Amino acid sequence: MTNIPDDENNNKPAVPPQPEASLAGNEVAKSARQGLARRHFLRRSIFVVGGVSIVIGGAGALYMLYPSLAGQFGSTLDLGPKASFPAATPEAFTLNRAGVFYQESARAFIIHLARDTPYLLTGNALEKQLADEWFTRDSDGSSWLALYQRCTHLAAKVAFRNDCLSCKCPSHGAHFHCDGEYLDGPAPRNMDRFPLSFKGENILVDTSQLLHLPGTGSQPGPNSMPRLLPIPQTPCMY
């Protein structure tokens, strides 16, 4: 029997065979796309890992820094009980015994003025000036102050002098009252100070904040502040 050609099959277009070159090109393109995707992934991974490393490193640095400052100059220091710093009036100040106490850890003089201190101001004017000069009032009516040890002229370390009941700079003679107010000499302003506060019965001094005040009384300039204490009459020679 003679086979009759199937017209339907004969009418279908013949599919030409794909050349090997086209297949190879497709494989190359696919490999290139995969390689590019891997490179993008690796680049993003490097950025993410680098960012995490920076964050961790920064946190570690802060962690290492904090304990190095805690309890040292540049942080808030607990100087011990108030009872270790008995108050006195200015004429009775004696270094490390009454009214004025040097604290090496805070690089400061702790001033404790008794309740019956003879101020030049009274009432609201007195309270405002005490606040402006960063005194801290205690519940017993006495006043506290933390004076930075450096002279405001050229930053030499000043000394409290029992013989003249005031602070004197040994370098160029700048002279400050026992509360840090300018008296005479080349200093441009009052002694700088730190915030002082209480924690129960203990004294806290924040040595991370250095507070600057303008001059007082005889110090020239438009920003001169009212004077709190009478000028001492005892001369303070070199």
Image (tube, grey):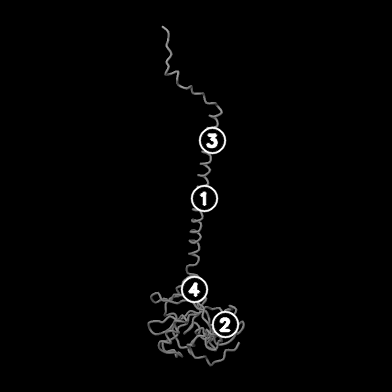
- In space, the residues marked 3 and 1 are separated at their CA atoms by 27 Å
The answer to which of marks 4 and 3 sits earlier in the sequence is: 3
Which marked residue is nearer to the observer: mark 4 or mark 1?
Answer: 1
Residue at the outermost bottom position: 233
Residue type of the residue flagged with mark 1: Phe
Image disc number at residue 47? 1
Q: Position of residue 235 (x, y in %)?
A: 57, 91
Which marked residue is nearer to the observer: mark 4 or mark 3?
Answer: 3
- In space, the residues marked 4 and 1 are separated at their CA atoms by 39 Å
Asked where in the image residue 1 lies, by quadrant, the reply is: top left
Residue hosting label 4: 209
Residue drawn at x 43%, y 18% is 9
Classify residue 126 as left or right of residue 181.
left
- In space, the residues marked 4 and 3 are separated at their CA atoms by 65 Å
Residue drawn at x 46%, y 80% is 134
Label 3 crowd (10 A; few <14 / some 14-19 / many >=20) = few
Classify residue 154 as left or right of residue 90.
right
Residue hosting label 3: 29
Residue type of the residue flagged with mark 4: Gln
Residue hosting label 2: 188
The answer to which of marks 2 and 3 sits earlier in the sequence is: 3
Q: Nearer the viewer, residue 66 or 190?
A: 190
Which marked residue is nearer to the observer: mark 2 or mark 3?
Answer: 3
State which quarter of the image contains the C terminus. Answer: bottom right
* SS for dot 1: helix
| Total number of numbered discs in the rendering | 4
